[in-house]
Every structure is written in C-alpha cells, then in structure tokens.
C-alpha cells in the first residue's frame, strides 16, 4: 500500500512540475507581452505629447492673427437662427421664381460674362493705345514733312526771284495758317557785295514787281503741290515787256523740268517773245469779225 501511495505521489509531483513549467512559460510570455505593450504605450504617449505641442503652437499662432471669437449663442439659439434663415431663403426663392442653385448658376454665368467683357475692354484699350501712338507718329511725320516742304517752297521762291536779281523770303506759320511773303526788289551796288536793300511787304511793291513776285511764289508752290495742271489768267497785266518775257521764260523752264505737269497761260497781250516749240503751243484770238467770215482762233 505504501508503494501505491508513493507511486500516486510521484505522479502528482510530475503533474505539479508540469504545471509549474507551463506557468513559467506563461509568465515569460506575459512578461514579453507586457514589455511590448509598455513600449507601444511609451511611443503613443510620445506621439500624444508631440500632437499636444503642435496643437498648442497652432493655437498660439491663431491667437496671433485674431482674438478668440466669443460664444454669444447657445446651441438651441443657433439651431433656431438656422431654421429662420432657411425659411427666409425659401421665401426669397418663391419671390424670385428661381431656386438657390439657379441663382448661383446665373451668377456664375454673369461672372464669366463680366470677365469676358473685361478682357474685351482691355483689348480695346490696348488697340486704342496703339492707334493713338500711330496717330501721334503720323502727326509728327506730317509736321516734319510740312516743315521740309515749307523750306523747299522758300528755296524755290528765292531761286525764282533771283532771275530778276530779287531776293526774299516766305515765312509760313502753320499754327496760325498764314504765310508772310517779303521781297527785296533790288540790290544796292554801292554796298559791299551788292547787299540787298531792306525787305518790304508784297503790297508795297509796284504793280510789275508784285506780279513778278506772285508768279515766283505760284511757281514755288506748284513745285510741291503735286498738281498736274497750272492755270494762270492774265498774270502779266501790270508787267512791262521785259518782265513779261522774263516771267514766261522762267515759267517755261520750270515746266520743262516737270514732266508730270502742264500749264495754261491766258494773257491779254501778244506773246511774240514766246517761241513755239514741241512742248509750247500758242493760240491767239483774232480781233472780232463782225461779218463772221474769219475764224476766231489761230494756232501757232
């Protein structure tokens, strides 16, 4: 019997030892799990601390921009306010006959239209500035051309006057749209170099001098007028034969230098001093024939 009890005790001892080993393994596993959980907890606590610090910094930065908004309404009051606003919006939609979405679409379309019109206006302003700049350039070019042509007219006028040893000047005032013509009709041989006399206005000249000066001016203006035809009617009425011959010679020489220009000269006197040429035609009217037997015109 003692042996049987001893055998049972040995088996119980084996069971206890086995349970001890199992408990030891369980405790070791629980220890490892606890270590792992503690590490996770420490990492989570670190992340929480970092997030808390970030929130605190964000709050401080936000407070730097504006003060904290005071809470003046409770939740029920805010809910009531929202409902009132919704009822107001519904009433406005009924009054307008459009929903909020339709109003928003119309507003977006109007916004796009306004942007397009704004771009069109900017393009028109740019085009207007370009046209304005071009117009100013053309005005400057026109004024420069007008100044040059005024100088050319004055140069031709002086050169024409020198055919009779005259001198003079054409001063053009484009702002006032006037031209002042002065003529020095003679030279004083007693002065050094034959200096010109004091200039006088055209109206102070004699009839022949005035006619000759005006012919010189007309020829100078025709040089820049680009007109294909020059008509002179009795320009030599107040001229003597010498001045008439001089004026006609000057006219013919000038016209021969202009292949694109013709002239018709009407004179009450005979033009015997003008010689016929391939480019010069003289037509003379006969004295009136009261019987009607003779032609009125003769062509030389």
Image (spheres, rainbow, N blue to C red):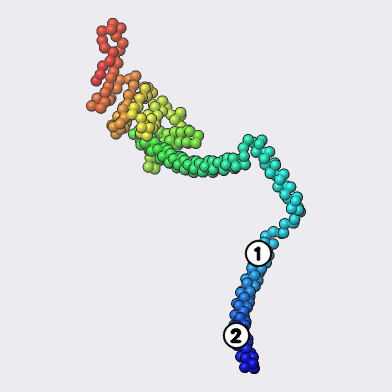
135 with respect to 285 (left or right): right
The residue that label 1 is drawn on is 58
Residue 224 lies, in percent from the top left, at 37, 34
Q: Quadrant of residue 143?
A: top left
| In the image: residue 139, left or right of residue 241 | right
How crowded pointer 2 is (Cα within 10 Å; few <14, some 14-19, many 20+) is rated as few
Q: Which mark is residue 18?
A: 2
Q: Position of residue 258 (x, y in %)?
A: 30, 33
Of residues 17 and 93, the one drawn nearer to the viewer in this rendering: 17
Quadrant placement of the C terminus: top left
At which x and y percent is residue 245? 31, 27
The answer to whether residue 98 is left or right of residue 186 is: right
| Total tally of numbered discs in the picture | 2
Compared with 268, 27 (above or below) is below
Asked which quadrant contains residue 230, the reply is top left
| Up/down of 194 relative to 283, above or below | below
Residue placed furthest toward the left? 278
Tag on residue 28? none
**Residue 116: image location, x then y, percent:** 52, 42
Q: Quadrant of residue 278?
A: top left
């Amino acid at each position: 019997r003692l042996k049987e009890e001893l055998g049972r005790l040995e088996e119980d001892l084996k069971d206890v030892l086995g349970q001890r080993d199992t408990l030891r393994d369980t405790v070791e596993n629980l220890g490892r799990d606890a270590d792992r959980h503690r590490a996770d907890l420490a990492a989570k606590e670190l992340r929480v601390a970092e997030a808390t610090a970030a929130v605190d910094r964000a709050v401080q930065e936000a407070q730097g921009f504006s003060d904290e908004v005071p809470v003046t309404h409770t939740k029920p009051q805010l809910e009531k306010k929202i409902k009132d606003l919704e009822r107001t919006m519904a009433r406005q939609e009924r009054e307008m006959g459009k929903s909020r979405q339709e109003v928003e679409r119309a507003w977006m379309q109007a916004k796009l239209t306004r942007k397009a019109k704004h771009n069109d206006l900017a393009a028109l302003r740019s085009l207007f500035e370009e046209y304005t700049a071009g117009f100013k350039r053309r005005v400057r070019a026109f004024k420069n051309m007008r100044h040059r042509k005024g100088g050319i007219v004055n140069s031709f006028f002086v050169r024409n006057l020198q055919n009779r040893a005259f001198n003079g000047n054409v001063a053009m005032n484009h702002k006032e749209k006037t031209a002042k013509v002065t003529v020095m009709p003679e030279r004083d041989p007693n002065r050094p170099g034959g200096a010109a006399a004091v200039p006088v206005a055209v109206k102070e000249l004699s009839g022949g001098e005035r006619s000759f000066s005006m012919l010189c001016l007309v020829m100078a203006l025709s040089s820049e007028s680009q007109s294909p035809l020059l008509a002179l009617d009795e320009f030599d009425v107040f001229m003597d034969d010498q001045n008439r011959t001089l004026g006609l010679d000057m006219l013919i020489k000038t016209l021969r230098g202009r292949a694109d220009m013709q002239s018709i000269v009407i004179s009450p006197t005979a033009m015997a001093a003008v010689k016929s040429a391939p480019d010069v035609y003289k037509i003379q009217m006969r004295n009136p024939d009261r019987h009607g037997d003779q032609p009125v015109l003769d062509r030389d």
